[in-house]
Amino acid sequence: GERNCKETCVVLKSICVGFLGKWLLKFLYGTSTWNIEGKHRIKSLLAEGKSVIVATWHSHMLPTFMDLAGNHYYGLAGMHKDADLISKIGNRMGWKLLRGSSSDRGKEVYKEMVNILADNGNVVVLTPDGPKGPAKIPKPGIIRAAQKTNAVILPAMGQSKRRWGFTNWDTFYVGKPFSRIEFIYGEPLEFSESEDFDLCVKKLKNAIDDLEKKVEKRAL
């Protein structure tokens, strides 16, 4: 009846959105030239038997999302409507997405993440200030997870020379096609449980901020 028709429409719409979103991103980012520095660090750390948390700001997440797609790495998407879309596109692009945020399913998703990181050789990509800010202030979860599991945090940052910026609680950047993308994977950070927590937050923030300045300069 009508209800089944509505449900079918919802399913078809989500398939279309996921499909179109994937190809739109492939067009925007696949037609650009990429200059990538430091990507070998991921493989080196995995070869040492470590798990890796790749960390970038929410505003600049798309270059990281695109560069690491297809590796079956883990990502994190919230529970809100926009995250449903991200999740559908991510699944189509070879991401394994955990669902939850600090305000919704927070404890459950943190446990899932810790279990994944404790199993050596996994990669989890996070935006420490997502999903709703405040911008460029890391939330405690990423540091706690790294301390608990001995996972290494790898700061990452990419920016497109030509881009759109959409302002909400941060300015979310989307690269324009046929552009140049500058990308840096920074120096690995390790935090022990005995380290001062606020100092760890400061180190992580400074590391990602420094990379942002570098890529913004290179993408001029």
Image: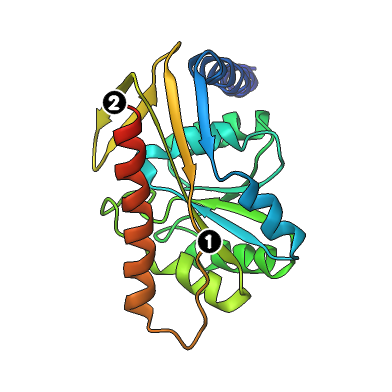
Number of marks drawn? 2
* Residue identifier under label 2: 220
Identify whether 162 is placed above or below 94. Answer: above
Residue at 54% across, 70% down: 145
Mark 2, other Cα within 10 Å: few <14 / some 14–19 / many ≥20: few
Taking depth in this image into account, of 141 and 206 the one nearest to the observer is 206
Image coords of residue 66 (percent x, y): 56, 31
Identify whether 197 is placed above or below 53. Answer: below
Q: Amino acid at mark 1?
A: Pro
Image coords of residue 213 (percent x, y): 29, 43
Identify whether 11 is placed above or below 91. Answer: above
Q: Determine the image quadrant of residue 173.
A: top left
Image coords of residue 36 (percent x, y): 53, 35
Identify whether 62 is placed above or below 212. Answer: above
Labels 1 and 2: the sequence-earlier one: 1
Q: Is residue 138 left or right of residue 154?
A: left
Asked if the residue under mark 2 is in contact with the one under mark 1, i.e. CB atoms within 8 Å, the reply is: no
Q: Amino acid at mark 2?
A: Leu
Mark 1, other Cα within 10 Å: few <14 / some 14–19 / many ≥20: some
Q: Is residue 173 visible?
A: yes
Image coords of residue 180 (percent x, y): 43, 20
Q: Determine the image quadrant of residue 82.
A: top left
Residue at 39% across, 16% down: 176
* Tag 1 secondary structure: loop
* Residue identifier under label 1: 188
Taking depth in this image into account, of 47 and 73 the one nearest to the observer is 47
